[in-house]
Amino acid sequence: MPVRFARLSAAALCVTLAACTYRLEESHLVRPLPAPPADLAALQMLYPDHVATESRIEAADGASLYRLTLRRPDARATVLYYGGNGFRIGPHAQHLLKSYAALPVDLILVDHRGYGASTGTPGVDAMRADALQVYDRVRADTAGPLVVHGQSLGSFFAGHVADHRRLDALVLESSMTSAEDWTRAMRARAGFWTRLAVRRFDIAPALQATGNLGVAARLDEPVLYVVGADDVVTAPAFSQALFDATPPQVDPRLLVVAGRSHNDATLSPEFRDGLLELLARIEGR
């Protein structure tokens, strides 16, 4: 999800020390990133317990979304994964499978529009609509429990789905309260001259509704928040805020993984144990 915050430095160079406004655009978060589809033979060789198949989901506006399904015979549930900014199934499925290889779940991945092997033009509103359509299709095809897992930018789409559908369970990894909070945090990490010059932010309308703080307050399904203790992009304080905003009756869980950062918190025994505990909670309902 990270925006290259050097853009703020470039903006600061264009002004005097008088404070200026920085505009956060959609294109700073989402942009076309095509890539080839997954190498099924390579996945099968590395993860022989899984059977990999490809298919497509046709979006309402004609975009064609690439889907990879990985099934295993001992699966107790299915996980639908929404990747972060830059996630593409072809280059990154092997990395994600490292997180899930020891877990008894089927895994379904779908490239965002304009990313990987999917067609279409990326845009936050269109990607939110895609997320709902993808969930509905997968839910219709899935007999057992379905867990929705979103990482970073993908956690916003997973949260959007949870806000509009009743899920069996939700995993929000490296998530954020709001675009405004995230922009302020990025400014705080920038250099002195950038902080001095850039005092105000203008958030593009589509991004003003991006974030999970309001979603967290309305959750009515089991939720596991996951974040690396060393994450400087979406710091643990933001997952803590989401956890604190979640209704107590949902019994939310927060997992802050020591020694992990923005993209590797799930590559840990702590995540494996947390996901197994989440599956047990689903099965016990």
Image (cartoon, rainbow, N blue to C red):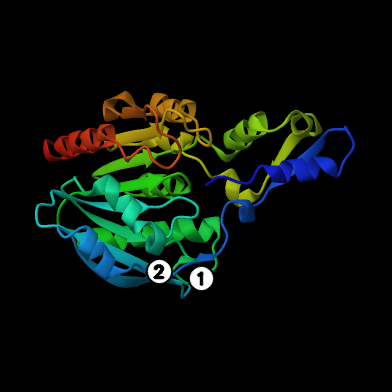
**Pointer 1 residue:** 120
Along the line of sight, which residue is nearer the eye, 261 or 53?
A: 261
Mark 2 and mark 1 in contact (Cβ < 8 Å)? yes
Q: In which quarter of the image is residue 56?
A: bottom left
Element under disc 2: strand
Give the percent coordinates (x, y) of residue 63: 46, 72
Amino acid type indicated by mark 1: Gly
Q: Residue at x 38, y 52 (%)?
A: 82
Amino acid type indicated by mark 2: Leu
**Pointer 2 residue:** 65
Give the percent coordinates (x, y) of residue 247: 34, 27
Tell me: 218 left or right of 31: left
Classify 10 Å Cα crowding around label 2: few (below 14), some (14-19), many (20 and above).
many
Above or below, 184 relative to 58 = above
Q: Which residue is drawn at 76% across and 34% down?
A: 194
Give the percent coordinates (x, y) of residue 127: 48, 59
Element under disc 1: loop
Above or below, 191 relative to 117 = above
- Tell me, yes or no, if residue 284 can be seen here: yes
Q: Which of marks 1 and 2 is nearer the N terminus?
A: 2
Q: Residue at x 9, y 57 (%)?
A: 73
Give the percent coordinates (x, y) of residue 182: 58, 36
Q: Quadrant of residue 48?
A: bottom left
- Tell me, yes or no, if residue 140 can be seen here: no
Along the line of sight, which residue is nearer the eye, 196 or 260?
A: 260
Q: What is the count of numbered marks?
A: 2
Q: Residue at x 52, y 47 (%)?
A: 1
Classify 10 Å Cα crowding around label 1: few (below 14), some (14-19), many (20 and above).
some
Q: How far apart are marks 1 and 2 (CA)?
A: 8 Å
